[in-house]
Amino acid sequence: MKSLPHVDEVFEKVDYSAAELSGEEFECCTFRDCDFSESNLSESLFTDCRMIDCNLTMVIVGQAGLRNVAFVNCKVVGVDFSNCLPFLFTVSFEKCRLDYSHFIKNRLKKTIFTECTIRDADFTEADLTGASFGKCDLSNTLFSRTNLSHADFRTSLNYSINLETNTVKKAKFSLSGVAGLLSQYDLVLE
């Protein structure tokens, strides 16, 4: 029997680590300082929710719906967002750690990433049209066949983007970040 949806609830300091939460529904809920590490959120639906100071390391999100979910100061390491439901998938990240996470083929138009570490992540074939990477560390993050049109990287660091295999029309970069656009040419810039 399916449980009733959780609406307008606040969850604080709840330990969901390694828990089975698949099929749950949350609408307009706030999760503060909760531990979801290695939990199973498959087929769950989160709509208009906020995750604040939460640990979502290695959480399983197969066929989960994330619709207008804001992550603030969260640890979201090793999460495969490419397994989420694509319909109405909208997320934002502020001061989060997104290392080793996957966004393969995700539609992330106008998604905002602010002051995040996004190291060793994968955005292969994602649509990041109009996305903003404000003050993000993108060390070893993979962009391959990715649509970066109108994306803003002006304040980000350590990115390496191949101009020949990605769409970068009208994308914004700082002059100091040009080296990250030319790395595939093995040039010496001084």
Image (cartoon, rainbow, N blue to C red):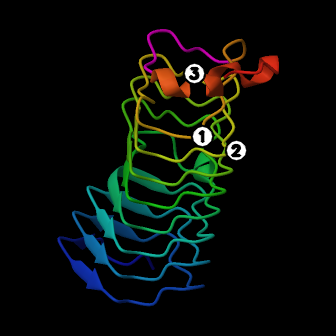
User: Considering only vertical position in the picture, is 34 above or below 142?
Assistant: below
Magenta span has 167? yes
User: Considering only vertical position in the picture, is 13 above or below 80?
Assistant: below
Amino acid type, mark 2: Asn
The image quadrant where one finds the C terminus is top right
Q: Position of residue 133 (x, y in %)?
A: 43, 38
User: Considering only vertical position in the picture, is 136 above or below 189?
Assistant: below
Q: Which picture quadrant has residue 15?
A: bottom left
Residues drawn in magenta: 166-173
Magenta span has 99? no
Q: Which picture quadrant has residue 95?
A: bottom left
Label 2 or label 1, whichever lies nearer to me, is: 1
Q: Which residue is mark 2?
A: 140
Number of other residues with Cα within 10 Å of mark 3, as a class: few under 14, some 14 to 19, many 20 or more: some
Q: Nearer the viewer, residue 187 or 72?
A: 187
Magenta span: chief secondary structure: loop
Q: CA distance from mark 2 to mark 1?
A: 8 Å
Number of other residues with Cα within 10 Å of mark 1, as a class: few under 14, some 14 to 19, many 20 or more: some
Q: Which residue is mark 3?
A: 178
Q: Position of residue 186 (x, y in %)?
A: 82, 21
Residues under numbered marks 2 and 3 in contact, where contact means CB atoms less than 8 Å apart: no
Q: Residue at x 52, y 22 (%)?
A: 148
Residues under numbered marks 2 and 1 in contact, where contact means CB atoms less than 8 Å apart: yes
Q: Which residue is mark 1?
A: 158
Q: CA distance from mark 2 to mark 3?
A: 16 Å
